[in-house]
Image (spheres, rainbow, N blue to C red):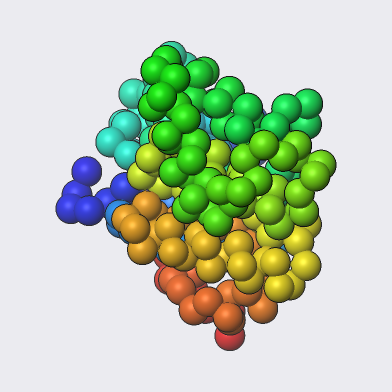
Amino acid sequence: MAGNAVINLKNVDVYQQKHLVLTNVNLNIDKGEFVFLIGQTGSGKSSLLKIIYGDLHIGNGEGSVAGFDLKKLAIRDVPYLRRKLGIVFQDFQLLTDRTIEKNLEFVLKSTGWTDKNLIQERIKDVLEKVGLRSKIRKMPHEISGGEQQRVVIARALLNNPEIILADEPTGNLDPDTSEEIVMLLKQISQGGTAVLMATHDYHIIRTFPSRIIKCESGVVHEDATIG
Ligand SMILES: Nc1ncnc2c1ncn2[C@@H]1O[C@H](COP(=O)(O)OP(=O)(O)OP(=O)(O)O)[C@@H](O)[C@H]1O
């Protein structure tokens, strides 16, 4: 992988089944970059994210993500790739039957953490990062939608990912809460984790000027504008 790149795609074709969604994608994202991913519904944003988190195979071309060669990625490698990625989607997907602490503990245990003290420390660390240390014992339904999304971000940070992939992370949130979430993601990127955030929210994009990648008519523009 060249230089500081954490995502590098070269001449990649993206297929959903037999349908060619994106052609000849070239994309380079460096450590610590914050990047918006835009494009109309159906333009291929989710498909591109799926290539990056190993849910779709690359057809033609070459790709590497967090040091994994996508061409050689076997199904058994996917969990290891995912540990280098933090995935934050629109639906919060917290387990509703347990506390915030137990939600985070569940992820750590299922990714190989065994030491109780280290688990406790890590949970406190990530909750501190998202400003929710005091909510550790709350159930998901006892905190707001914005706070739930912060917990999802905390969860994504547990294994110190190189990249956060966020697919419409503010889709269910009011404008002020959305801004707080994007501010948090920006802050995380400044700590060295690259953030790729798919969004339809032009207000957010104008508020947080950043590099924009756009899916349009079957191609990806690496440095787009919203005009
Ligand atoms: N599982 C699938 N099988 C076949 N085609 C699919 C599948 N998933 C998506 N597609 C098609 O691939 C194209 C790109 O879809 P994709 O979900 O990547 O778009 P998107 O830009 O993320 O849209 P949205 O903004 O609505 O989430 C669309 O034409 C869609 O119909």
Residue 124 is situated, as x and y percent measured from the top left of the image, at: 48, 40
> Residue 141 lies in what quarter of the image?
top right
Residue 175 is situated, as x and y percent measured from the top left of the image, at: 74, 72
Check the image and report above or below for 67 versus 187. Answer: above
Please name whichever residue, 96 or 81, is drawn nearer the observer in this view of the structure: 96
Check the image and report above or below for 36 versus 134. Answer: below
Q: Is residue 161 visible?
A: yes
Residue at left offset 32%, top offset 55%: 192
Which quadrant would the C terminus be assigned to in this image? bottom right
Residue at left offset 49%, top offset 50%: 128
Residue at left offset 27%, top offset 51%: 5
Residue at the outermost right position: 141
- In the displayed structure, does residue 162 sit left or right of residue 39? left
Residue at the outermost bottom position: 227
- In the displayed structure, does residue 63 sit left or right of residue 53? left
Please name whichever residue, 193 or 219, is drawn nearer the observer in this view of the structure: 193
Check the image and report above or below for 55 versus 41. Answer: above
Residue at the outermost left position: 3
- In the displayed structure, does residue 179 sit left or right of residue 93? left
> Residue 146 lies in what quarter of the image?
bottom right
Q: How many marks?
A: 0
Residue at left offset 49%, top offset 25%: 108
- In the displayed structure, does residue 5 sit left or right of residue 37? left
